[in-house]
Amino acid sequence: MLAYIIRRIIYAVPILIGVNLITFMLFFMINSPDDMARAQLGAKQVTPELIRSWKEERGYDKPLFINHKAEGISTVTDTLFVQESIKLFRFDFGVSDANRDINSDIKERMMPSLAIALPTFLIALITNISLALLLVLFRGSVLDAGMMIIAVMIMSISALFYIIAGQVLFSKMWHWVPISGFESGWSAVKFIILPVMIGVFAGIGAGVRWYRSIFLEQINQDYIRTARAKGLSEIKVLFGHVLRNGMLPILTGVVVIIPSLFMGSLIMESFFGIPGLGSYTIDAINSQDFAIVKAMVFLGSVLYIVGLILTDISYTLFDPRVKL
Amino acid sequence: MSIVLLWTDIMVWALVISLLIWGWVVSRSVQIKKQWHTIFKSSIAMVSAMVLLFYLFFALLDSIHLRFPIHSAGVQNQKVQYEGDIVSPLDLIFSHNIESTERTYSAPFSTHEYAKSIVVDENGVTKQAYLPLKYVSQSDDLVLKSFAALVVGLIISCFLIVLHIFWRAGGHFMERFRQTWQGKTHLPWRTAYLTITLLIMTFTWLYMLSFHYHVLGTDKVGGDVLYQSFKSIRTGVLIGVLTTLIMLPVAILLGVSAGLFGGWVDDMIQYLYTTLSSIPGVLLIAAGVLVMQVMIDTHPHWFETTLERSDLRLLFLIMILGITSWTGLCRMLRAETLKISQMEFVTAAKAFGVGKFTIIRRHIVPNLMHIILISVVLDFSGLVLAEAVLSYVGVGVDPTMYSWGNMINQARLEMARDPMVWWSLFSAFVFMFILVLAANLLSDRVQTVLDPRNRV
């Protein structure tokens, strides 16, 4: 088991190098560091000296891939790409363009993000699976058909609509919860409840349809027929056989996103003024802060790869046929 | 008058032409024709297809760009000067709405502005009053005008339907007409005609009243919301359609080669899509668009007009969306190719000495068609919705471009006002909802019919 995990982590390294290469090409090849300096400093009072000092400050003055001035191995290592990659692999994200330490910002903002994303994820998982099981129990009935139409409609409405409608109804008209903001500790609940509810509701259409299709695939299998033939009640068949065997495809889709919950949700956080990583990213995008965007891309990829590894591990726990 | 070809225009018309060719090729294959008949046997699929056609019509109408020369009397033998504005046929249809810009917000059908302004009356007293709108008829014969508009819509749709029945009948017009009327046709044409009539009547009602009112109100700077909603159709449809068009060849090529050739080719392609898909989609899009924006900003001399600039940004957004969305399809195609290439008929073909490319063309790609088709229709609705979110995040289409996302984004800032400025949001959401719902319903049907797992 341990050997397998280590092997997977080693496999992850080339992928992360690839991610680095892609972001690097995006940020440094399409626009040269000179372009970035000009965009950051403002077009008007740019002098060559200013650009040079801006680049030196951030270490952008090195050549991209091959340093012809250096000797030996450092022709490759003393370059912008290698230096930047090493920094990222050490999770040293440096300072943002607004001169803030990105690492401490990320640490500070992870918890608020998780406070929204984790409850949304858990409640959505439970509601969607229970609703899907209910529909499978009543499959082919009017309830099933009606709910499926409603599910398509829920899917077809933009998430922005749910957010805006929720804020107008619950905050502006009925004053049940504050419209936006965040506090630490237990008093955060009143800020969290609306975004969580909206997040769950917006995903219910797609979620229920997906789980329902998984369960329906199980229900036509031979072992289900055997279970019924043994005289098991429909409820027992559903929970004991359909749900258990459906867990495997569900795991593939679900476990992989768990680590990414740390990244938070971009729109939710910025609409509800939650100081998490999602709103951090949006602010960085709007102020064109490349250092933060690059850090978030790398962090997001790492978390996704962790998710992939977790998926494989959870497979062995749930399916005895899979051996590592 | 000269035609201006924007990049996205070229692509969208290339797509239309290739679709027509594909339709012609498909119509010769009995089997595929039968599949499409099965899809459209369902009334829901027919209604959805009509709605999508209606949207596509406006998107295409807005994808021809014209430039008119300035008429300067007296000056001869000079290079023709063009007006700064590039217009599309849709702009020409709605030209009265472009000109009738009010001062600020006004509710749908209202005759006065939304907020009070300070005016000085004839006695020299300053007071607050609702100013009347400039381009709205103050008479209230709304019912009569609506009736006239609906009648015009009915006449137009009747004309189109009769024309279509005539084309379908090929001689036996009365017989076909009776069959259609009684709903006894092979495909649910009656439902289709009803949908089209409804759509056309809604359009003529909105359109003809827009000469007298701001049917869906006006926005912050007094622009007509109805016009903006129709202009946004092109943006939404193009993002939904062209993104898939761009990613499709890449996904098919890489997916099939990975599955068929195996070995290091497979390893490379798997590595490529794992790497790309491990970058969070929104962030990759954000990074890409940001970088592109810097490039556009540092090279202003590339573009003659703002329209060309926003068009390039749209094109780039479509490409970035394509890059982030081909990985899923590629993975599916690889798995399916792997499965198919183990099957007996492929082994038999190999044994007969059939070449690799012939095997791909004749045995593999036709068996992948259902996956490709399902993913195209499935992706469409997701992309239309994604446009709105991306524009909100600030990495969507150019802020000067009309799009539902931009409309929502601008209206969102006015949420705190009381009474609420709801009409921009409402229009954008309704236009988007109808399009996405139609696409989702159609994709459901396509999936039910084409997915072999659903066959009983």
Image: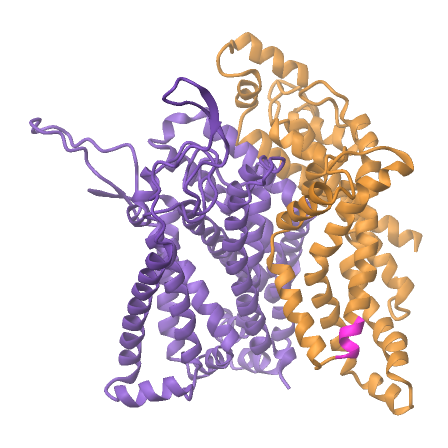
Please say if A98 is above or below A208: above
User: Which color was chain A given?
Assistant: orange
Please say if A118 is above or below B255: above
Q: Is residue A191 magenta?
A: no
Please say if B392 is above or below B302: below
The quarter of the picture where residue A298 lies is: top right
Question: What range of the chain is rendered magenta?
Answer: A133-138
> Residue at horizontal 39%, vertical 74%?
B193
> Residue at horizontal 78%, vertical 61%?
A252
- Nearer the observer, A6 or A179: A179
- Predominant secondary structure in magenta? helix
Rendered-image quadrant of the C terminus of chain A: bottom right
| Chain letter, purple in picture | B
- Nearer the observer, B217 or A121: B217
Residue B205 vs residue B236: left or right? left
Residue A202 vs residue A52: left or right? right
The quarter of the picture where residue A124 lies is: bottom right
Rendered-image quadrant of the N terminus of chain A: bottom right
Q: Position of residue B366 (x, y in %)?
A: 51, 74
Most distant residue in the front direction: B123
Residue A310 vs residue B123: left or right? right
> Residue at horizontal 37%, vertical 73%?
B25
Asked if residue B240 shows in the view, the reply is yes
Q: Position of residue B411 (x, y in %)?
A: 55, 39
Please say if B286 is above or below B186: above
How is the structure coloured here?
Answer: by chain
Q: Position of residue B140 (x, y in %)?
A: 36, 50
Q: Position of residue B328 (x, y in %)?
A: 63, 58
- Nearer the observer, B311 or B274: B311
Asked if residue B334 shows in the view, the reply is no
